[in-house]
Image (cartoon, helix red, strand yellow):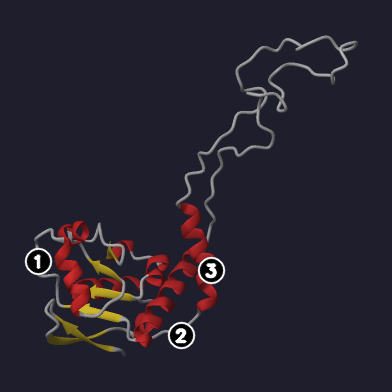
């Protein structure tokens, strides 16, 4: 059972926390990451891109000139793709990009990533985020104090912390319910409040 030190926001040790082996000390399974991350990224695509086909562009259906005797190639109406303002051929059409991945695979990949972060020593547990002030400087100072190059900050619910992280490219806030594999892998360090760590442990434990 991994035992992690709990710090306050000023980097003082205040306690230790025991987390379950099933979630934070599981076997590493990096082969699960690709299908899950791919599904997460594809789910963000809107799929609303659209080009007009020949039948959808504005224009007359009248034949542009007579069939024979002009010396030009044979043509129908001016909405043909080879004319200016004609329809597109094989252009993109609206479509859903979602890829279905089993829920168990999502869960197993996230548990593996969390366990890898613990083994790397890249998980930091805070007693709580003590400040209710919305201040980007506070988060930037926190990252510098703990020497974190980039960090994913997770709490159960913390609006002030969420707003304070918005302008920092090296930090991102998520609620414990929104924790996902892509963001865990993207940021070098994972910062959990005590409450969030227990919530994640309880949600992912078999």
* 16 relative to 188, above or below: below
The quadrant of the picture occupied by the C terminus is bottom left
Determine which quarter of the picture holds residue 157: bottom left
**In the displayed structure image, the side of residue 68 where residue 147 appears, left or right:** left
Local packing at callout 1 (Cα closer than 10 Å; few below 14, some 14-19, many 20+) is few
Q: Which of 82/176 is in front?
A: 82
Decide: marks 2, 1 in contact (CB < 8 A)? Answer: no
Q: Secondary structure at mark 3?
A: helix
Determine which quarter of the picture holds residue 54: top right
Q: Secondary structure at mark 1?
A: loop
Furthest-right residue in this view: 69
Local packing at callout 3 (Cα closer than 10 Å; few below 14, some 14-19, many 20+) is few
Q: CA distance from mark 3 to mark 2?
A: 17 Å
Local packing at callout 2 (Cα closer than 10 Å; few below 14, some 14-19, many 20+) is some
Name which residue lies at 30% across and 80% down: 123
Q: Position of residue 66 (x, y in %)?
A: 83, 9
Discs 2/1, front: 1
Q: Which of 144/151 is in front?
A: 144
Q: Residue tagged by mark 3?
A: 34
Q: Is residue 159 visible?
A: yes
Query: Is tag 2's residue or tag 1's residue first in the polypeptide sequence?
Result: 2
Q: Residue tagged by mark 2?
A: 27
Name which residue lies at 30% across and 75% down: 149
**In the displayed structure image, the side of residue 192 where residue 204 appears, left or right:** right
- Counting every numbered tag in the picture gives 3
Q: Is residue 193 visible?
A: no
Q: CA distance from mark 1 to mark 3?
A: 37 Å
The quadrant of the picture occupied by the N terminus is bottom left
Q: Position of residue 8 (x, y in %)?
A: 13, 79
Numbered mark located on residue 73 in the image:
none
Q: Residue tagged by mark 1?
A: 131
Determine which quarter of the picture holds residue 204: bottom left
């Amino acid at each position: 059972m991994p035992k992690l030190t709990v710090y306050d926001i000023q980097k003082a040790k205040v306690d230790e926390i025991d987390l379950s082996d099933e979630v934070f000390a599981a076997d590493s399974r990096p082969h699960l990451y690709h299908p899950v991350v791919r599904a997460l990224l594809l789910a963000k695509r809107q799929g609303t891109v659209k080009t007009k086909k020949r039948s959808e562009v504005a224009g007359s259906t009248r034949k542009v000139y007579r069939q024979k005797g002009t010396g030009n190639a044979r043509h129908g109406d001016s909405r043909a793709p080879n004319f200016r303002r004609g329809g597109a051929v094989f252009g993109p059409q609206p479509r859903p990009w979602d890829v279905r991945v089993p829920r168990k695979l999502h869960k197993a990949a996230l548990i593996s990533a969390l366990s890898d972060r613990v083994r790397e020593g890249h998980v930091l547990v805070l007693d709580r985020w003590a400040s209710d002030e919305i201040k980007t400087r506070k988060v930037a100072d926190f990252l510098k104090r703990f020497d974190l190059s980039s960090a994913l900050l997770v709490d159960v619910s913390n609006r002030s912390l969420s707003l304070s992280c918005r302008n920092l490219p090296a930090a991102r806030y998520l609620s414990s319910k929104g924790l996902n594999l892509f963001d865990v892998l993207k940021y070098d360090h994972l910062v959990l409040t005590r409450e969030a760590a227990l919530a994640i442990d309880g949600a992912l434990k078999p």
